[in-house]
Image: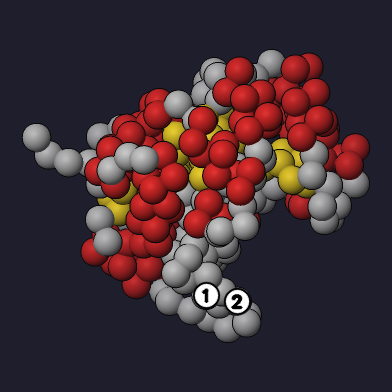
Amino acid sequence: MRTAGYVDTHCHLYDQRNKDGTVGLTVDEIITAAQAAGVTTMISVGCDAASTAQAIDVATRYEGIFATAGLHPHEASHGVDTIVPYLDDPHIVAVGECGLDYYYDHSPRDQQRTAFAAQIQLAHERNLPLIIHTRDAWADTFDVLAAEGTPPLTIFHCFTGGPDEARQCLALGAFLSFSGIVTFKTATDLHEAARLCPPDRLLAETDSPYLAPVPHRGRTNQPAFVTHVVEALATLRGESIEQVRNATSGNACLAFPGTRP
């Protein structure tokens, strides 16, 4: 039986900046490194109209790369209409990332909530998965989902909550996607959430170029490093790397049907 490859369910392949703002690896170099590490599928996530277009462009040029169309809460003031035209592209496999970010508040909170609600409705209308970004806004995130109805395929990207938030997300039928933060020793609440997550709701991501995992913490992240996320999840859960790799890659096909071969 052929073993599954790694899947990075959330990265930003069009963003090649190093942490100091200089230009880093090319897209080709990033994808080549990921494939050499055994990563067979990558979902390049849009945050506004421009980055959605860039994500689509990368997906058109490389096998195993898919794109999403989303308006990040930081960009909510631009309006959801700016991303709607991209939803018809065949390389789009989800709506998002979208949600609420009350840590930075780069867009007014009322505009964030409006944009989030609108993208939930787009996910319903287009029968697409929804990718959620939430930071310091759990209560309002759950309130908006309750008002609009949680799409059948919902992914909490870069999940950073503890066991209570994990249980609430799981009760909605959502997937929990863990990033490099799960490799940090101090993330004890997140570790507990990773342990309690059922194997059929578990996903792995990098959110590259951000949040590089141990042992690359402090460096520019890349999809190849999703292997460290899977390894950390396996250690926390008392499972083998192969078990977690197969679970997260299989779940990615379920959470994002458009990525299925």
- Where is 18 relative to 126, above or below? below
Q: How far apart are labels 1 and 2 at the CA level?
A: 7 Å
Q: Which of marks 1 and 2 is nearer the N terminus?
A: 2
Q: Mark 2: which amino acid?
A: Lys
Look at the image and tell me in which quarter the N terminus lies: top left
Mark sitting on residue 50: none
Residue 210 is left or right of residue 4, and the answer is right
Q: Quadrant of the C terminus?
A: top left
The image shows residue 145 at horizontal and vertical percentages of 72, 23
**Left or right, residue 91 beside residue 16:** left
Task: In the rendered view, tell whether residue 153 sits above or below residue 203.
Answer: above
182 on left or right of 3: right
Asked whether the residues under the numbered discs 1 and 2 touch, taking CB atoms below 8 Å apart as contact, a structural biologist would say yes
Look at mark 1 in the image and give the residue it sits on: 219
Disc number lying in front (1 or 2):
1
**Residue flagged by tag 1: what amino acid is it?**
Arg
Residue, far left: 1
Q: Position of residue 185 (x, y in %)?
A: 56, 58
Q: Where residue 110 sits in the image (x, y, percent)?
A: 90, 37
Is there any visible trace of residue 93 in the rendered image? Answer: no
Q: Give residue 190's position: percent from left, percent from top.
A: 60, 44
Query: Which residue is located at x 74 percent, y 45 percent?
Result: 135
- Look at the numbered disc 2 and give the secondary structure of its residue: loop
Residue 140 can be seen, yes or no = yes
Residue at (57% x, 36% y) in the render: 193
Q: What residue is shown at x 50% (from left), y 57% (from top)?
A: 183
Which residue in the structure is indicated by mark 2? 19
Q: Rate crowding at label 1 as few (under 14), some (14 to 19) or many (20 or more) other CA atoms within 10 Å.
A: some
